[in-house]
Image: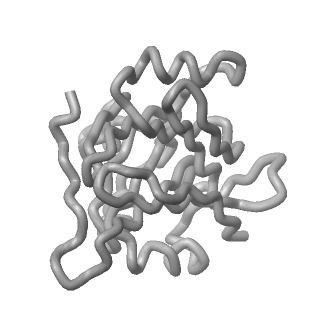
Amino acid sequence: MYALVIARPTAGQDVHMKVVAISDTHAPRRWRSCPPAVAEHLRDADLILHAGDVCVADVLDELAGYAPVRAVLGNNDGPDVAAWGAPERLELDIDGLPTAMVHDSGPAKGRIARMRRWFPAAALVVYGHSHIPMNETGDGVRIFNPGSPTDRRRQPHGTIGLLTIEAGRLLRATILPVT
């Protein structure tokens, strides 16, 4: 089920992986190009996860200029994002950490149990849609919504997520304000 394997950086680099999680960029209405505060964190990323509502595939191409990108489809994404390679749900192995991604995780009530049912083997589930940053653990799974860097809605800041992964363990999961 977790056929896609993303390995740690090459020899000579840190042994941990820096993964930047991003969601709900809503281009071109909200994202015309990568905001400098976001780009600052992408420059040394080993992997970028986009949890949907990219809206145009050009954003994924732009992000891929920084690091490999894996993305899922959001409710506002068109056929060009699907053609780029974004499925509705994605399960991947990031340096031994079983990880899943989906855009809409459903209502807040029961979310952890639902993510456990949808992705029984996942230790980490990254999702988007609500634009509300979330970093919560329960039932053996970490659920993580990086929020949106460009469309904060009722949140005080635009945000992204930083994940530090090493040898199958999630060492850190941080929500970082970028506006």
Residue under the image location 70 percent in, 60 percent down:
158
- Quadrant location of the N terminus? top left
The image quarter containing residue 156 is: bottom right
The image quarter containing residue 122 is: top left
In this picture, is 138 found above or below 107?
below
Residue under the image location 20 percent in, 84 percent down:
12
Residue 73 x %, y %: 41, 36
Front residue of 39 and 4: 4
The image quarter containing residue 121 is: top left
Q: Is residue 65 left or right of residue 1?
A: right
Residue under the image location 61 percent in, 22 percent down:
111
Query: How many numbered discs sit on the rendered protein?
Result: 0
Q: Can you see residue 28? A: no
Residue 35 x %, y %: 57, 73
Residue under the image location 71 percent in, 18 percent down:
109
In this picture, is 37 found above or below 149?
below
Q: Can you see residue 167? A: yes
Q: Is residue 87 left or right of residue 109?
A: left
Front residue of 95 and 23: 95
Residue 54 x %, y %: 47, 48
- Quadrant location of the C terminus? bottom right
Front residue of 143 and 70: 143
Residue 46 x %, y %: 32, 68
The type of colouring in the image is one colour
